[in-house]
Image: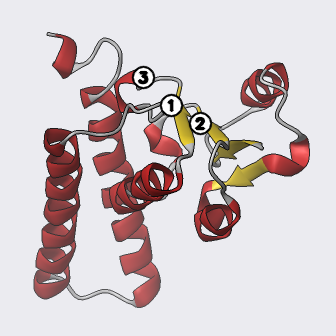
């Protein structure tokens, strides 16, 4: 099966790109439904996503990538081809280390802010989401085709 992963950032262009990849509309999944998608994946499946910034967080990217590796699923990330997983190509130690480190930094920042500022739970949800988005953008630019790794 072929799947597409989207988020609130995607628009009509993404839908057309997925149609070109012959991804049925019912196989286009929102990034917030990663758990359901991971359960339904089987060896030989392929998941297409425009960018890593479509994932809810760096941790969810790392977990999803690990599940794809374990299950023999191809993960095709259009804007960060360095992170593609397919046919024996898996993330190396340094890539996994970098993703884990980014997750640790994000968790440290969340804990530090919560320790030093008082806010209601809705405010914290907004702050946490902003940190997750910023962290995902750093990963997206670091691993992009013209990013830091190419310089």
State the mark number for residue 95.
none
Earlier sequence position, callout 3 versus callout 2: 2
Image coords of residue 16 (percent x, y): 82, 23
Residue at 20% in and 71% down: 107
Image coords of residue 30 (percent x, y): 69, 55
Relative horizontal placement of residue 90, taking residue 115 as reference (left or right): right
Q: Are marks 1 and 3 in contact (CB under 8 Å)?
A: yes
**Rendered image coloring scheme:** secondary structure
What residue is disc 1 on?
77
Residue at 62% in and 50% down: 43
What is the secondary structure assignment of the residue under circle 3?
helix
Quadrant for the C terminus, please. top left
Residue at 45% in and 40% down: 52
What residue is disc 3 on?
81
Q: Which of the 4 image quadrants contains residue 118? A: bottom left
What residue is disc 2 on?
49
Q: CA distance from mark 3 to mark 2?
A: 11 Å
Against 19, is 125 above or below? below
What is the secondary structure assignment of the residue under circle 2?
strand
Against 132, is 25 above or below? above
Residue at 43% in and 76% down: 125
Q: Are marks 1 and 2 in contact (CB under 8 Å)?
A: yes
Q: CA distance from mark 1 to mark 3?
A: 6 Å
């Amino acid at each position: 099966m072929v799947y597409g992963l989207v988020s609130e950032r995607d628009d009509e262009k993404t839908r057309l790109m997925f149609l070109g990849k012959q991804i049925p509309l019912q196989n286009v999944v929102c990034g917030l439904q990663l758990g359901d998608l991971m359960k339904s994946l089987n060896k030989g499946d392929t998941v297409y996503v425009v960018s890593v910034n479509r994932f809810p967080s760096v941790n969810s990217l790392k977990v999803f990538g690990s599940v794809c590796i374990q299950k023999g699923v191809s993960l095709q990330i259009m804007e960060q081809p360095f992170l593609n997983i397919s046919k024996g190509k898996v993330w190396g130690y340094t890539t996994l280390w970098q993703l884990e480190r980014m997750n640790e930094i994000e968790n440290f920042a969340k804990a530090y802010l919560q320790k030093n500022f008082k806010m209601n739970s809705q405010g914290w949800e907004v702050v946490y989401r902003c940190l997750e988005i910023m962290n995902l953008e750093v990963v997206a630019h670091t691993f992009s085709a013209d990013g830091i790794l190419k310089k």
